[in-house]
Amino acid sequence: MTTVRKIIEDKARTEVYTIPSTATVLDALKAMDEGNVGAVLVTENEKIVGIFTERDYARQGEVKGRHAEDTFVRDLMSTKLVMVKPETLLTECADLMRQYHVRHLPIMDKDKLVGIVSIRRLAEALLAEDKGTITKLEHYILGTGYGE
């Protein structure tokens, strides 16, 4: 079974984007755009206190009369963080995302933030794992691929 460590190791770019809770939603949206990510972790005094996602903005922002340039991230962020370790199985990540209705899981390694598992990265990794299993089964059934 594949673990989160594989996602960390497979990605050349594992930068985690953070923003202070006092930043505006517009600042957070700009950071997400620049980093091409769907979420930023929110900090206070260098401690992670929440996560702000595109979904938070879509559900709590303009449609509720809040304007990105004058709303603070802390007013829209999610404070319910579900974190995983590099040793966490990918299937466990999927279960956690489903159970807690989240799409991003910060990865902590010995009290240090080392990355984020997004639902997209998780799906890509699970699909790759399934393709590998299918290929192995095809080789077994056909009696091919040994010694290659």
Image (cartoon, rainbow, N blue to C red):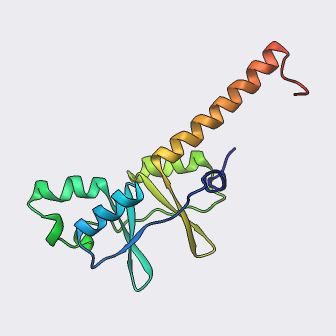
Q: Quadrant of residue 31?
A: bottom left
145 w.r.t. 69: above or below = above
Q: Residue at x 79, y 15 (%)?
A: 141
Picture coordinates of residue 93, whole percent (x, y): 54, 51
Left or right for 45, reference 5: left
Q: Quadrant of residue 142?
A: top right
Q: Residue at x 24, y 57 (%)?
A: 57
15 w.r.t. 23: above or below = above
Front-most of residues 118 and 92? 118
Q: Residue at x 27, y 69 (%)?
A: 27
Q: Residue at x 75, y 22 (%)?
A: 137
Of the 4 image quadrants, the one containing the N terminus is top right
Picture coordinates of residue 61, whole percent (x, y): 17, 59
Left or right for 69, reference 82: left
Work out which residue is located at the far top of the displayed protein and give it. 142
Of the 4 image quadrants, the one containing the C terminus is top right
9 w.r.t. 113: above or below = above
Front-most of residues 20 and 104? 20
Left or right for 121, reference 21: right
Picture coordinates of residue 12, whole percent (x, y): 61, 55
Work out which residue is located at the far left of the displayed protein and give it. 65
Work out which residue is located at the far front of the displayed protein and give it. 34
Q: How many marks?
A: 0
Work out which residue is located at the far bottom of the displayed protein and give it. 45
Front-most of residues 48 and 14? 14
